Amino acid sequence: MQALRHWQLQRDADGIAWAILDKQGASTNTLSAEVMTEFGLLLDAVAGDPPRGLVFRSGKSAGFIAGADIEEFTRIESAEAAHALVQRGWDAYNRLAALPFPTLALVRGHCMGGGLELALACRYRIVVDEPGTKLALPEVMLGIVPGWGGMLRLPQIVGPAAAFDMMLTGKNIDAKRAQRMGLADACVPPRVMENAARMLVTSGQPQRALPLMQRLLNGPLKSIVAAQARKQVAQRASPEHYPAPYAILDMWQHYDGNALAVPSDKATSLAAIFRSATTKNLVRVFFLQERLKAFGKTGSGIVAPRHIHVVGAGVMGGDIAAWCALRGMTVTLQDQTVARIAPAIARAATLFEKKLRDRKAARFALDRLIPDPQGMGVRQADVVIEAIFENLDAKHQLFAAIEAQAKPDAILASNTSSLKLADIATALKNPGRLVGIHFFNPVAMMPLVEVVAGAATDPVVAARAAAFVRQIDKLPLPVKDAPGFLVNAVLAPYMHEAMRCIDEGLTPETVDAAALAFGMPMGPLELADTVGLDVAVAAGRQIVSDAAPPQKLTALVEGGNLGKKTGRGFYVYANGKAQKGMAGTPPAGLAERLVAPLLAATERLVKQGVVADAELADAGVIFGTGFAPFTGGPMNYLSEHQEHQT
């Protein structure tokens, strides 16, 4: 076999061949055209000299295969080239699946997209039980489909319901879940992974067979499964905005998961998907997300924090503390009494059970979250986060006390959403230590965190804050110290416009339905109820100060109806859910009217330098508000609409 640059083929004394992928010049394994060409040569070599078994593994210290090379994908200029890319992977993995000897994928770390499709084409799969092991088919999040065999093989291995749960959402699963659902044959600790692979690949063990009902759902009952799945998808996404999930269902139901077999004139064909503006924009969003992640890279001298101290055990503070504990940190949570802290601990316990799905792991996470009414944890903390009520005098007193006790190198952060960081910093002897770390509600669901630099904030402190945000698996967005920063500054005028529609006689259901039809994940009035109408009033005073507050908003707040947290706002809430009536027919142009203030605010904030550029504004508004991702973000949306008008 000719020398390969990215793959190594090693044979041991037991007759087992080890195919090791270590993509040169890259920290992560991706399946570029060159890697896939060499993959074909590797298959030639083992087909010509068959081993007892073939094991695929990564040569990287972290990660199996991250999927296809997205940079390469962005350079595709025609539907024919997209078809050829899919053909390349489809043929290669079918060839792997047809090898006459046992094959096994040893998965340690992230295994995404084409990487998981390679594993699916093997006879066996072993996953390594450690936090970094995640498996996913995330193509739908890029507006494309898992065309290298994922749509064919995943339903055959785990059943269509579990397969669609992954393919139609892009969600990832951990090692233990992979074993429970039958995606992995074994889940093993790192120290025994190679021996486990040797034993399984030479065991002669038959492949796991699906139960009879799952085989029926994957065969004669396909149409029923597909119809039900389409109904569920339609509740979240329309085919005009997000064609990929509908294409996945059509390809599975009618073409056995073979994207190449769909006629090019169909709306679910590869050609149609490639031409879709959604695909282009979702790929753009992927790169925006990667740019945000890069702000959190730890450079020289930045040490990952271990101990976090949060002051304020309300909804935001308590949930910030819980999230940090979930991500493996020791967290002390301070409030005036243990009784005030108790509800936050109870919410954390529910979060840990839901996220970890393991009683022991949930117990360990809860042990890391320590009630601290006396604030003793300040002295040991690497990061201190203030999350008390929005009162400048109270924050001044608190930060003066914190600065006197905290370690000299501890980050002092405020989660303020409406006060200027520069005003808070006047209480500190060294104002350069203060940075804004602004989370969004609900903390566990919202991926973005604004990292706010005040006029006096030390750039090193801001960089360390961004690294901390990334360490807890959030996306850091650097913003300047301005009213509402970015996200709240664009949301406030959007929500106020929706409230003015209520004053004009429209129903909340009608207004919210128009926003949902535009592509928003939640209507502006339900969002205002979720944030809290008292918060909306405070934000309005600061950000939308040039107009009188909406009458209905004022009346609700004066009556003590603050939204979801009090059970009544624009909607009545039962068991945490808005009780909605039927939406009326929205007036023409209502959606455009609602988003116009948001678009104008985003454009203004870019010009003012609150965010560095239009790309970061798009990233912040998408990941901080859920602004319709298929548009590519508000600035991209404005740009494309201006192009269409000229």
Image: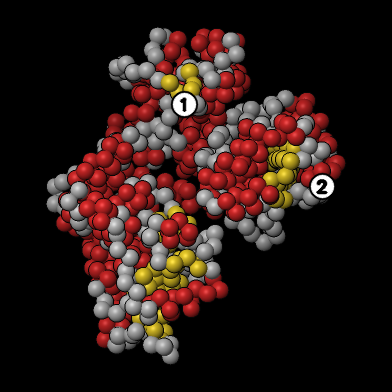
- Residue extending furthest front? 212
Q: Nearer the viewer, mark 2 or mark 1?
A: 1
Is residue 174 shown above or below 266? below
Q: Which mark is residue 379?
A: 2
Q: Position of residue 446 (x, y in %)?
A: 52, 39
**Residue 421 occupies quadrant:** top right
Dot 1, crowdedness within 10 Å: few (<14), some or many (≥20)?
A: few
User: Could you tell which of marks 2 and 1 lies nearer the N-terminus?
Assistant: 2
Q: Position of residue 543 (x, y in %)?
A: 58, 23
Q: Could you say which quadrant of the image residue 510 lies in?
A: top left
Question: For the point 29% across and 57% down, which residue is it?
Answer: 211
Q: Identify the residue shown where x is 24% and y is 73%.
A: 98
* Residue 425 placement, left or right of 521: right
In x, y percent, where is residue 359? 57, 51
180 or 123: nearer the viewer: 180
Q: Relative to 399, is 469 above or below? A: below
Q: Residue furthest bottom?
A: 13
Q: Position of residue 72 (x, y in %)?
A: 35, 60
Q: Is residue 173 above or below residue 13?
A: above
Please tell me how crowded label 2 is: few (under 14), some (14-19), or many (20+) other residues with Cα within 10 Å.
Answer: some
Kindly tell me whether residue 75 is visible in this rendering: no
Q: Secondary structure at mark 2?
A: helix
Rendered-image quadrant of the N terminus: bottom left
Labelled disc at residue 232: none
The amino acid type of the residue labelled 1 equals: Lys
Gap between marks 2 and 1 measured at Cα: 41 Å
Q: Please tell me the numbered disc located at residue 577.
A: 1
Three-letter code, disc 2: Arg
**What kind of element bears circle 1?**
strand
Q: Quadrant of residue 537?
A: top right
Q: Is residue 353 visible in this depiction of the protein? A: yes
